């Protein structure tokens, strides 16, 4: 489970092989080709909170909850060793996106799985973004858990715009801090609704985490629009987007279609994963270069200002 950026992804981003992107800005490599110890310790965090190292896991969930939880923990440990501060998994990665599995998994089983993953995040000293169902006494939700290096769940975002029948729509947007950098999150079908990104950006978010289990490769007509939409969310708001999607299965063509990616604030792709492989992408995000300028400009439009303010008031702001 070594962190990597594929050659194809680097070429697509317009970078030559051997670019510093492959190892992270400012990192030096040891004789074995792995980051030196001091760089690993310093890579994920920055004293002035301007840089953040993210790892995107293009995770292939099984229908075995225990196996999924075990592999989440292994990936967090591996990514932390390679210098990541944030490790991001796809939509419903904890259980799989399978309706039957989700319906059969009990509330207690989900709570136990969450606790195990949270403990692993604490042990690895990383933030984790994990896709999982949430089951309350009366309602199920399609959720994204934001777990801190202390093992605490500081946000449980529920997907607002649903594409599945088993879940209840979420009721809030949010902005939450990761090492002092304000971030937000959307899940899959949410990406088609620009307001779910713009309002959190006006509220202060500079990195958007996007977790998904997009349609599979049999629905080829959707694949280019998926990429275009999320690139637009980055460019129209001038923020980073960190996207984790599930891969396709080579034998059955089931699952999603991979192509997890990290996108710059100008909308260009830094790196993108393959279609079929379970793999990890990593990049150092320089937040000092992120302004959220176009979103803020929308909010400054005089005749729409009150309208935007009413929308921003609906964004839940979570403090450290």
Image: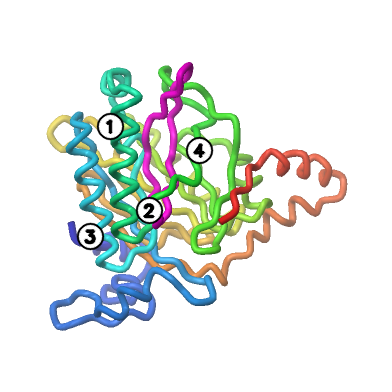
What's the CA distance linking mark 2 and mark 4?
21 Å
Mark 3 lies on a secondary structure that is helix
- Which residue, given by chain and number where applicable, does mark 3 sit on? 78
What's the CA distance linking mark 1 and mark 4?
18 Å
Residues packed near mark 3 inside 10 Å, few (<14), some (14 to 19) or many (20 plus) = some
Mark 2 or 1: in front is: 1
Pick whichever of labels 3 and 2 is earlier in the sequence: 3
In the rendered structure, the answer to whether residue 67 lies left or right of residue 273 reads left
Mark 2 or 4: in front is: 4
| Secondary structure mostly taken by the magenta-highlighted segment of the chain | strand
Pick whichever of labels 1 and 4 is earlier in the sequence: 1
Residues packed near mark 4 inside 10 Å, few (<14), some (14 to 19) or many (20 plus) = many
- Against 145, residue 31 (above or below) is below
Pick whichever of labels 3 and 4 is earlier in the sequence: 3
Asked whether disc 2 touches disc 1, contact meaning CB atoms under 8 Å apart, the reply is no
- Which residue, given by chain and number where applicable, does mark 1 sit on? 96
- Against 178, residue 94 (above or below) is above
The quarter of the picture where residue 136 lies is top left
- Check residue 118 for magenta coloring: no
Pick whichever of labels 3 and 1 is earlier in the sequence: 3
Image spot of residue 46 (x, y percent): 46, 74
Image spot of residue 292 (x, y percent): 63, 59
Q: Which mark is residue 157?
A: 4
Pick whichever of labels 2 and 4 is earlier in the sequence: 4
- Which residue, given by chain and number where applicable, does mark 2 sit on? 261
Asked whether disc 2 touches disc 4, contact meaning CB atoms under 8 Å apart, the reply is no
Q: Nearer the viewer, residue 23 or 6?
A: 23
Tell me the residue at 20%/47% (across/down): 277
Residues packed near mark 2 inside 10 Å, few (<14), some (14 to 19) or many (20 plus) = many
- Check residue 141 for magenta coloring: yes
Q: Which residues are magenta?
A: 127-150
């Amino acid at each position: 489970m070594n962190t990597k950026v594929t050659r194809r992804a680097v070429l697509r981003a317009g970078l030559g092989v051997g670019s510093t992107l492959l190892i992270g800005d400012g990192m030096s490599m040891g004789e074995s080709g792995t980051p030196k110890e001091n760089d690993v310790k310093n890579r994920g965090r920055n004293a002035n909170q301007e840089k953040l190292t993210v790892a995107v896991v293009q995770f292939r969930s099984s229908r075995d909850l225990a196996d999924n939880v075990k592999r989440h923990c292994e990936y967090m440990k591996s990514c932390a060793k390679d210098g990541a501060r944030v490790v991001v998994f796809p939509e419903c990665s904890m259980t799989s996106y399978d309706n039957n599995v989700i319906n059969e998994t009990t509330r207690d089983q989900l709570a136990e799985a969450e606790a195990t993953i949270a403990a692993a995040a604490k042990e690895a000293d990383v933030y984790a973004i994990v896709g999982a169902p949430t089951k309350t006494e009366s309602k199920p939700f399609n959720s994204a858990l934001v777990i801190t290096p202390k093992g605490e769940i500081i946000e449980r975002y529920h997907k607002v715009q649903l594409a599945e029948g088993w879940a209840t729509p979420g009721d809030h947007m949010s902005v939450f801090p990761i090492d002092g950098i304000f971030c937000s999150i959307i899940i899959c079908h949410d990406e088609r609704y620009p307001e779910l990104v713009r309002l959190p950006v006006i509220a202060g978010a500079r990195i958007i985490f996007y977790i998904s289990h997009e349609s599979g490769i049999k629905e080829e007509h959707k694949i280019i629009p998926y990429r275009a939409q999320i690139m637009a969310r980055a460019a129209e708001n001038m923020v980073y987007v960190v996207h984790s999607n599930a891969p396709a299965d080579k034998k059955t063509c089931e699952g999603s279609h991979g192509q997890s990616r990290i996108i710059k604030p100008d909308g260009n792709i830094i790196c993108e994963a393959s279609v079929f492989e379970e793999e990890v992408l990593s990049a150092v995000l320089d937040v000092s270069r992120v302004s959220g300028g176009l979103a803020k400009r929308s909010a400054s439009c005089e005749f729409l200002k009150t309208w935007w303010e009413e929308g921003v008031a609906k964004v839940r702001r979570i403090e450290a």
